[in-house]
Image (cartoon, rainbow, N blue to C red):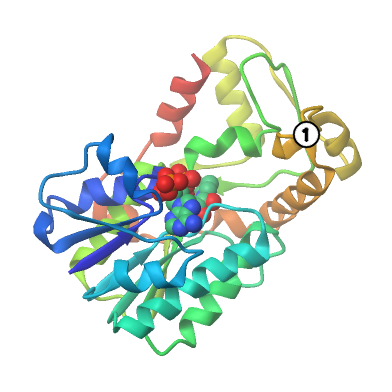
Amino acid sequence: MIVLTGTTGGLGSQVLKHLLPLVPASQLTLSLYNPTLSNTVHFPAGVTVRRGDFGDPASLDTAFAGAERLLIVSYPSIAHELRVRHHVNAIDAAKRVGVKHIYYTSLAFADDSVSEVMQAHLDTEKYLKESGVMYTIIREGIYAESYPLYLGFFDKSKTDMYVPGDGPIAWVSREDLGEGTARIIAGGGFENQTVLLSGSASNNLTLHQLSTTISRILARALTLHVVSVDEYVAQNKSPNPDDPRGSEDFLRKWAKTFDAMRRGETARMEAYLEKTLGSPSDADKEALEQYAK
Ligand SMILES: NC(=O)c1ccc[n+]([C@@H]2O[C@H](COP(=O)([O-])OP(=O)(O)OC[C@H]3O[C@@H](n4cnc5c(N)ncnc54)[C@H](OP(=O)(O)O)[C@@H]3O)[C@@H](O)[C@H]2O)c1
């Protein structure tokens, strides 16, 4: 039996979609943070639904019971300690109930990453490697869909974008990541390994290259300004305290992502995804076009 977490989210839903043709639904269990969703959201026939909250270890014991393989989709938060604690809870529960193989969705930055967002993943990876349970760490490439976050919180109303650095990113769609992850889980192998799911060379684009493409799609001039971190914070700070961008601390932490990009951390590529899915995905262009129109 395979237990999947995060299947109501952007990545996990794609993993589920692409696992269904590969594995009988009766062998799939969804561990849901909010199982009442199953009253309104249509989950595929035959799958089992259980409640599993990363913040409630007892619920995870029940949710993961009987699993041979477990997918832990990383908890979506920028709160480092909470995020790591949630992952540790999931790994500990898996160990308690005898899960044989844990798959963890990490992120496509370097082992010695200077980015803030990678630190919780690196701590989790270390804990998982030392857990004694067989693992596969899947370093998921940077979502093409998340490009506005990298491009000075771009939206269609903008002409000028302010970023604290530039560098290439091997962009990849969440759908391709979901399919690659599903194939890894269903196909076996990758025992005690770390695998990078990256976009292909044709999708390895700097922010400048990306802004040129968006400019072409919108048929109007856009200017990308590479500025100091102070200027970046000043230009992007939101007056809304409920918006993460309302916090200067958030913006300064996020700015470290651009240091990582400059170091080439997000430009690394591995052939697995392209080899497995066939032709190189041009998903970033599709996402751009959808967003920019
Ligand atoms: N590779 C990239 O470029 C990239 C970009 C952005 C984010 N990420 C990270 O990748 C991960 C997956 O991304 P995503 O787009 O799928 O995120 P998402 O759409 O926000 O989905 C997150 C999933 O986590 C579940 N969840 C929330 N709180 C939970 C809890 N306490 N216990 C158990 N599950 C909980 C959510 O359930 P509910 O639906 O019930 O809330 C949802 O299924 C996240 O860590 C995200 O931060 C990666």
- What residue is at 28 percent from the left and 34 percent from the top? 40
Does any portion of residue 177 appear in the rendered image? yes
Q: Which residue is mark 1?
A: 241
**In the rendered view, would you say 53 is above or below 221?**
below
What residue occupies the far top of the structure in this picture?
219
Looking at the rendered structure, the secondary structure element under dot 1 is loop
Front one among 148 and 75 = 75
Query: Where is residue 162 shown, x and y percent of the image?
Result: 78, 31
Q: From this viewpoint, is residue 200 visible?
A: no
Q: Is residue 231 left or right of residue 147?
A: right
Does 223 appear above or below 53? above
Point out residue 6 in the picture as x, y percentages from the top left corner.
38, 53
Q: Quadrant of residue 147?
A: top right
- Callout 1, which amino acid? Pro
Q: Quadrant of residue 283?
A: top left
With 163 as the anchor, is 78 left or right in this view? left
Horizontal side of residue 40 vs 21, given as left or right: right
* Residue plotted at (67% across, 52% down): 261
**What residue is drawn where x is 71% and y is 43%?**
166
